[in-house]
Image (cartoon, helix red, strand yellow):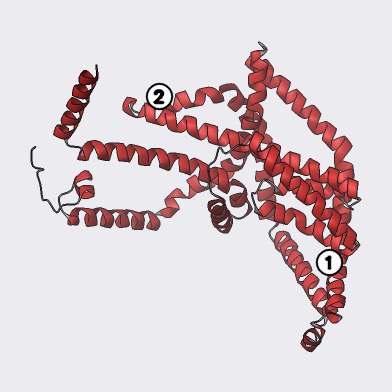
Amino acid sequence: MKEEKGNPGQSRVIRFLGGRTTLFVLGIILLAGLIILVFNQIQFVFTPVKVLIQNVVLPVVLAAVLFYLLRPVLRLLERARIPRVWGILIIYVGGIGLISLIVFLIYPFLKTQVINLVREFPEYFRQLILNIDAYLSTSLFASYYNELDVNLNLLIDSVFEDIAGFFRDTAGGIASGVTNFISTLTGIIISIVTVPFILFYLLKDGDRLPDYILKLMPPRMRRDAKEILHDADQQLSNYIQGQLIVSFCIGLLIYIGFVIIGMDYALALGALAAVTSVVPYLGPVIAITPALIIALVTSPFMILKLAAVWTIVQLVEGKFISPQVMGKTLHIHPITIIFVLLTAGSLFGVPGVILGIPGYALLKVIVSHLFKLFKKRYDEHEGNPNMRYETDSRKIIEKTGSE
């Protein structure tokens, strides 16, 4: 067996990168730092690109969500031998009809409940604080609690004054910057108006989009890129379809349960649960908070009924709905999901919380494939041809002997 050429103490990674000494790696790190410094100094050049992305990202994301939600319906219509364009028109007509039905039948009742809940929720909160005060004043901790000498009415008024001040400042800021407000509102309206057009072309040519992307790549990269695009498409499709279906089922079950137990504002609380369930782990906590406050103020028996409904809904969702609808397609650990939500929320706010998990899933697919390609290339680079020849020869001899 031939001896390996080069310095025996030389790192495999350095040889793999094409260098001979550690200075090569240090040079690469220095060059990367200089590139980052240069781009940081000329970042004004990328301002038009930043503005373009900010204006495009909202309609593209909304259109992509609707595309993955409606693509199975379009494929079902195509199996019924309906042309794709006609299938898209049928979907649009059905969508307009469904939206109109929701607006005329559900929206007025939901709007009334939401307005009443927002108007009366401060009183529920005030009553909850007073109930806690009455309980602590007569409990075993009464002596310690009375020593604190807390003025609850003043505390509650201060909290609500701070909240009202925040909204006044926000409204004042909007009023003082009418131009910016109108510009932002116009951008949102334009984004929403352009969604149907983007969605039409996604439904019409979305299945051929990967082929267009692959044609732009060198032939030797197309096989790996096709695999990455396929896995990314599966991850997004499974997550978006599954999460929306699960959220709708949770909202419907909570609404039915709250109606059965006689909870006030059942429709508003069910809608809130459906919307917040899009965010894993944090969503259910946000959804149950107002319901819990209302139950605590209403009666102790309502708390027990609320706990029963919430437990049943969570069991049905965890044992039946989610496994059947979503399965384990993302393969993301719960701790990782929490870290992703916290990080994305700190960086990008509410959009980061909503898009953090699918974004992480896409990044995981890309990084996993790149690591697999890196490992494959590293193994080929470091492998000894004589060892491979001896291994193959041994397999041939063992196979011949067994025959």
Closer to the camera, 3 or 83? 3
Task: Kindly state the secondary structure of the residue where label 1 is placed.
Answer: helix
Vertical order, 130 against 92 (above or below): below
Give the number of the disc on residue 20: none
Q: Is residue 165 left or right of residue 24?
A: right
Q: Position of residue 398 (x, y in %)?
A: 21, 24
Q: SS of the residue at dot 2?
A: helix
Residue neighbourhood size for the residue with mark 1, other residues' Cα within 10 Å, grouped as few (<14), some (14–19), many (≥20):
some
Horizontal side of residue 323 vs 329, given as left or right: right
Give the residue at the far front of this rendering: 402
Residue 194, position in %: x, y? 65, 34
Residue 189 in sight from this viewpoint: no
The kind of residue on which mark 1 rests is Phe
Q: Nearer the viewer, residue 100 or 37?
A: 100
Q: In the picture provided, is 94 more to the left or to the right than 365?
A: right
- Compare marks 2 and 1 and give the one earlier in the sequence: 1
- Which circle marks residue 125 in the picture? 1
Kindly identify which numbered label has been placed on residue 215: 2
Q: Nearer the viewer, residue 123 or 57?
A: 123
Residue 62 x/y as whole percent:
64, 38
Can you say whether 272 is above or below 100 in the image?
A: below
**Foreground label between 2 and 1:** 1
